[in-house]
Image (tube, grey):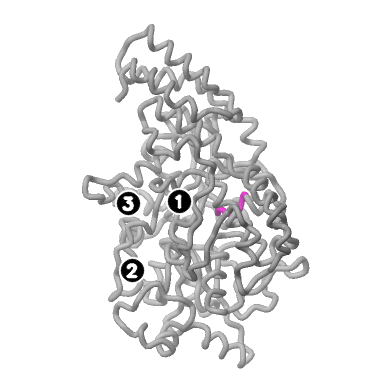
Amino acid sequence: MFSTALFSCTLISISTLLVGCSDSNISLEDLEAAAAKLETTPGDDSEAGAAVMEILDVEKPNLKFGFIKLTDCAPLVIAKEKGYFEEEGLNVEIEAQSNWKVLLDRVIDGQLDGAHMLAGQPIGATIGFGTQAHVITAYSLDYNGNGITVSNEIWEQMQENDPALKSDTPPHPIPATSLKPIVDSYKQEGKDFNMGMVFPVSTHNYEIRYWLAAAGIHPGMYTEENIQGTVDADVLLSVTPPPQMPATLEAGTILGYCVGEPWNQQAVVKGIGVPVTTNYDIWKNNPEKVFGVTKEWDEKHPNTHLAVIKALIRAGKWLDATDENGVLVNRQEAAKILSGKDYVGADEDVIDNSMTGTFVFQETDVRPMPDFNVFFKYYASYPHYSDCIWFLTQMRRWGQITEGKPASWYAETAKEIYKPEIYRKAAAMLVAEGKASAEDFPAEDYDGYRAATTEFIDGTRYDAKDPVGYVNGFEIGNKDPESLAKQ
């Protein structure tokens, strides 16, 4: 814990984190005034936090947040159950929603103050795909966490096409190469090959499309006339709510799906399907869910928003806490909490597979995956502009954005939706209160763009500062004039 003098020094040392952050009523001067107050009021460490907290006068203490029954709602649940919301002066109710559309609509119309959202939802809403509303995020809930599962019958056919898959522990990652002959056969016979994803702007939609297209399987294009995204499709992708995925697979309505946990592991437990890859293998440390609110809500409740982000940061840190050997120390408790009927409502033994760093592909193929769920490390909770831009490139690649856009549009749009200035201010307050360290967060000169990476299943290089070049780099998908890259 910080002493009074150290607390004051810490406030000054983190001052650069707050430069340019004007979206809230809390200013750097306010924080420094709190420190000055402590200089004249010696006391124990708890007074440091109290002095900072007393200047954060929340406008709306009673809040209702929505979520879908997936393990990556964990930061919201933990912030409530561990008392982090309460310590910020917030009385938060967390309510499960029936599907992603209902959740988004209820945030937009004000029935919910905010929600656990698909990372693509604030982006899609703000640019007007499907629903038009300015939705923002100042907090990324997690990296990774999804898988692609196929039915037992399809898996057996994939094994016939690739003998390497007949092993009890086949080599990973498993591309869709062995699926392509099956899809081609369905097409030749005039049969639809149906697979499920959770929402048109979900990470799951773009991940399953990426996986299929990397093997030459066309997942379909969106057009102004065809908002189902099935033009030229070899595989027909349809929306299924996450908890319904296993039952829909078992019924034969779909032959595979992309979904978050615990619904891939549930297919293994029920013996109805085989997860063939995770999104960690499709794109290592990819963004998955965010905490979203409307821009209007943020403008009315800036201090409340700050308090929420502070609590979520603490929850993320708790979820990713490890011992000296790097073992996650809180995940079993988290799995137990999440298993409650008011939260995910699946068996603890199903949830704890992935949450504790293990992923079960088959009974014979159980693999350590310590980064399957990442909530805080690698700066996972920071709202990176480059993450937003990746979703925009996929929306353009598949036609949800119907016309080519200049590179500058991608950067400007990301800044309208992702709000790191709010996150930085919340982080600075936590550092000042001794509840986080400066090393927990990106350096003050970080521009919001993660380094370019080739850590995708097909090795394609993603550089968020060249979105047009990235869109044009794929064999399947839209192509834009190179001149847009310079605009």
Q: What residue type is labelled 3?
A: Lys
**Residue 216 at x, y percent in the picture:** 56, 79
Q: Earlier in the sequence, mark 2 or mark 1?
A: 1
Q: Residue furthest right?
A: 225
Per the picture, the main secondary structure of the magenta-coloured stretch is: helix
In the image, residue 2 sits, relative to residue 285, either above or below, namely above
SS label for mark 3: helix
In reply to whether residue 119 is colored magenta, the answer given is yes
Q: Residue furthest top?
A: 40
SS label for mark 1: loop
Q: Residue 336 — which label?
A: 3
Q: What residue type is labelled 1?
A: Asp
Q: Residue 142 — which label?
A: 1
| Residue matched to label 2 | 360
Q: How crowded is mark 1: few (under 14 residues within 10 Å), some or many (20 or more)?
A: many
- Please give left or right for residue 403 compared with residue 184 in the image: right
Magenta residues, start to end: 118-122
- Please give left or right for residue 232 compared with residue 6 in the image: right
Contact, mark 2 vs mark 1 (Cβ under 8 Å): no
Question: How far is disc 2 from disc 3 in space, using C-alphas?
Answer: 19 Å
